[in-house]
Image (spheres, rainbow, N blue to C red):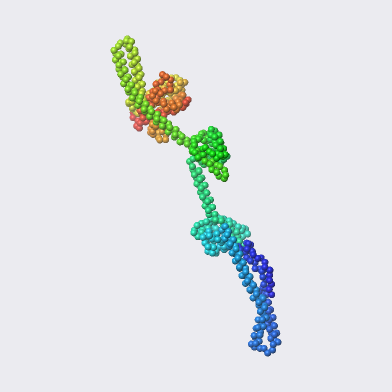
Amino acid sequence: MLREGKKEGGDSFNDPRHGMFGRFALTGTKTYLSPVRVLAVMALAIFTAEALVIVVLFFIPGVSGLALTLIDASLLVLLLSPALYFHLFRPLVLLVDERRRVEEELKTERDRAQGYLDVAGVILVALDRDGHVKLINRKSAELLGYEEKDIAGKGWFDEFTPPGSRAEARAWFLRLMMAGEGGSEGSYESPLVTRSGEERVILWSYTVLRDNGHITGALGSGEDITERKRTEMALVESETRYRLIHNTAFDAIIVSDDGDRVTDCNPSAEKIFGYTRDELIGLNLTLLMPDKYRERHREGLKRFLAAGTSRVQGRIQEFECLRKDGTLLPIEIILNHFTLGGRTSFTGTIRDITERKRAEREREFIQSSLSQSRKMEAIGRLAGGIAHDFNNVLTAIRGNAEFAMEDIDKEDPAYPRLNEIMRSVEHASRLTRQLLLFSRGQPVERAPLNINTVIENLLVMVTRLLGADITVAADLAPDLWTVLADEGNIEQVVMNLAVNARDAMPNGGHIVIKTENVVLDERSRPPAPEARPGRFIRLTVSDTGVGMEQEIIQRIFEPFFTTKGAGKGTGLGLSVIYGVVKQLGGWIAVESEPNKGSAFRIYLPAIEETPPVSG
């Protein structure tokens, strides 16, 4: 009545076609009759049993009523019991036992699978087609801050995805579910929100689960990459910060490799060296330095790579660099090195110190000029004191000589000697007056004066005085401002400068006398201690003579200092000019180089209002 079948299929846990954990195939374990056949068998059994009972009762005489009914029922039960047992009750018992066994095996396999999931080092979660959690491992639950039982059955995207990412994550999962045969796997980054409200970034990889070819859900494995993302973000921020500092640094920054070639630079390096970034990258460093440094640089690099010792790294030093246009630029540089990827690289921080050098030269010049000015002041006071005392002595000599000349006749042999004494006294008096003028001990009367008029009146005299081999040109500003000065003093200044220029041109040359109006501010004023902002007349006398060394320029205004031979000069000409200009509230700037001529620039303050001009 029933047929025992052979067990087939068995454990199919790893077959994704049967869901996440598989299923046991009951088909083939037992084969039972169909309900129609069971009903037919039962009907046949009842009919047969009833027929046998009727036959038996037919052969039993005298039985009727209640006894006949009891006998009929008893015989039917006796005859039908085997059929009911084998065709109804026994198959039901077997089915119940088989179901219990399968459920126990399924629970065992589920527990085993849960154990596998719990020891996995990644996040694992199983979702059905609607995104509800079917299963989750312990690591995932611990990350979220819940018990596993509190998570199962909940909507994954509604409960554990931040609101800002919820729609995108759900749409991605929906596309995965709708992919069908077109795709069964996918990965993406999506954040999770924990019980405490913290967001963790997870890199997900999903595998579609199928049962008999139908998509039933997805198994997702994830890696918590929050710290990695933070590190990446920190690296990006660090790189951005470095680039901002690198690119906005005032100093030039150049990075080179152990092959002495530029690997990186900032915009300031382009500005200092005159190359573009593309031109600098890959350029040999020796092309950025003058020849005098190159061999020493190569030896230092070779020594450092071989022994790790350097004489220049970590110290601020001053050198010159070679620009693209071939010009030299004073720089301040500090060198260092670092190792990256097993290779040594070098960094150079370079500062253009052109302005600083210029300021240092100006400061040295001003200090020198100030020292010279103080020395001149001291000499002036000394010369003034000596001149006063000497003038008193000359007055006594002259008075006595005049009395003696009055007491004797002109034919007296002593008269010529006394006359010679008088001439010497007169010469000495002129020297005394020059000394007093230099020391500003000689008072002068100043009045509004147009210097152009003074120069125009002197040109003819100056031209005749200097000789035919020297040409004199005048470049006079037509709207020249007025100064407060003594005409005789200005004439003396112009004449002394012209004579000084003539003496500097023994073979002839060219002299230019120029006047102009200038307005000076803090930036445009010349580097002289007396220089100050304001409105000035600038009188320039330039020549094409032999020029002077810097050491001579520092002494030319000293009394009795001269570069001329013995008996060819008193050394008071420029001293007198210095004294006159100082007395008028101005100053003198001298520019000269050997064999390039000289230029004396005199600055005199202009008066605010122009009164009637002295003629």
Q: Residue at x 30, y 16 (%)?
A: 400
Q: Position of residue 444 (x, y in %)?
A: 33, 26
**Depicted 122 relative to depicted 257: above or below:** below
For the C terminus, the image quarter is top left
Determine whether, in the image, residue 443 is placed left or right of residue 550.
Answer: left
Q: Residue at x 65, y 65 (%)?
A: 10
Question: Which residue reaches farthest top?
Answer: 411
For the N terminus, the image quarter is bottom right
**Depicted 214 relative to depicted 309: above or below:** below
Name which quarter of the figure residue 465 lies in: top left
Q: Position of residue 381 (x, y in %)?
A: 35, 26
**Depicted 345 relative to depicted 482: above or below:** below
Q: Nearer the viewer, residue 542 or 360?
A: 360
Q: Position of residue 430 (x, y in %)?
A: 35, 20
Q: Residue at x 30, y 14 (%)?
A: 404
Name which quarter of the figure residue 529 lies in: top left
Q: Nearer the viewer, residue 346 or 430?
A: 346
